[in-house]
Amino acid sequence: RAGTHRFFVKAAATALTAAMLRREIGAYGSLVGAFVPVVVGSREDEEGPVLVLEDLSAAAWEPSWSDVRIASALDTIQRLHGAAADLP
């Protein structure tokens, strides 16, 4: 329906997942590339960190691996491997 926005939300449930999510938020802040989802926002409160990303559920996830899609996936993996993130 028009005007509806969908998001992917990640919230920490334990001290370990809070530390991991803080690190992920930091990575999104320093990575640039078409392979990085849009960060809608993040916040920290007494419950822990929360990360909101663009919804990617409409992307093509089915396993129809044509030569073009395989080449695209391998190219994306290579670009991601070459990216550097300043992590704590």
Image: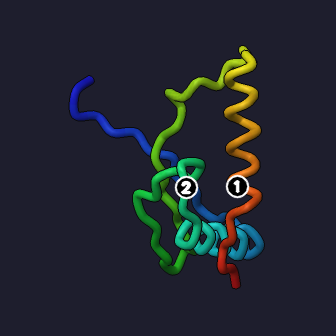
In the drawing, does residue 4 fall left or right of residue 60? left
Q: Is residue 41 above or below residue 45?
A: above
Q: Earlier in the sequence, mark 2 or mark 1?
A: 2
In the drawing, does residue 73 fall left or right of residue 9? right
Instruction: Provide residue 6's location: percent of width, then percent of height.
Output: 40, 39
Instruction: Provide residue 57's location: percent of width, then percent of height.
Output: 53, 31
Q: Secondary structure at mark 1?
A: helix
Mark 2 and 1 residues: CB-CB less than 8 Å, in contact?
yes
User: Dot 1: few (<14), some (14–19), or many (≥20) neighbours within 10 Å?
Assistant: some
Q: CA distance from mark 2 to mark 1?
A: 8 Å
Q: Quadrant of the C terminus?
A: bottom right
Q: Amino acid at mark 1?
A: Leu
Q: Residue at x 65, y 67 (%)?
A: 24
Q: Which mark is residue 80?
A: 1
Q: Nearer the viewer, residue 48 or 52?
A: 52
Residue farthest along the bottom direction in this orientation: 88
Q: Which mark is residue 33?
A: 2
Quarter of the rendering containing residue 82: bottom right
Q: Amino acid at mark 2?
A: Gly
Tell how many labels. 2
Q: Which mark is residue 22?
A: none
Instruction: Provide residue 17's location: percent of width, then percent of height.
Output: 72, 67
Q: Is residue 52 above or below residue 31?
A: above
Q: Nearer the viewer, residue 13 or 22?
A: 22
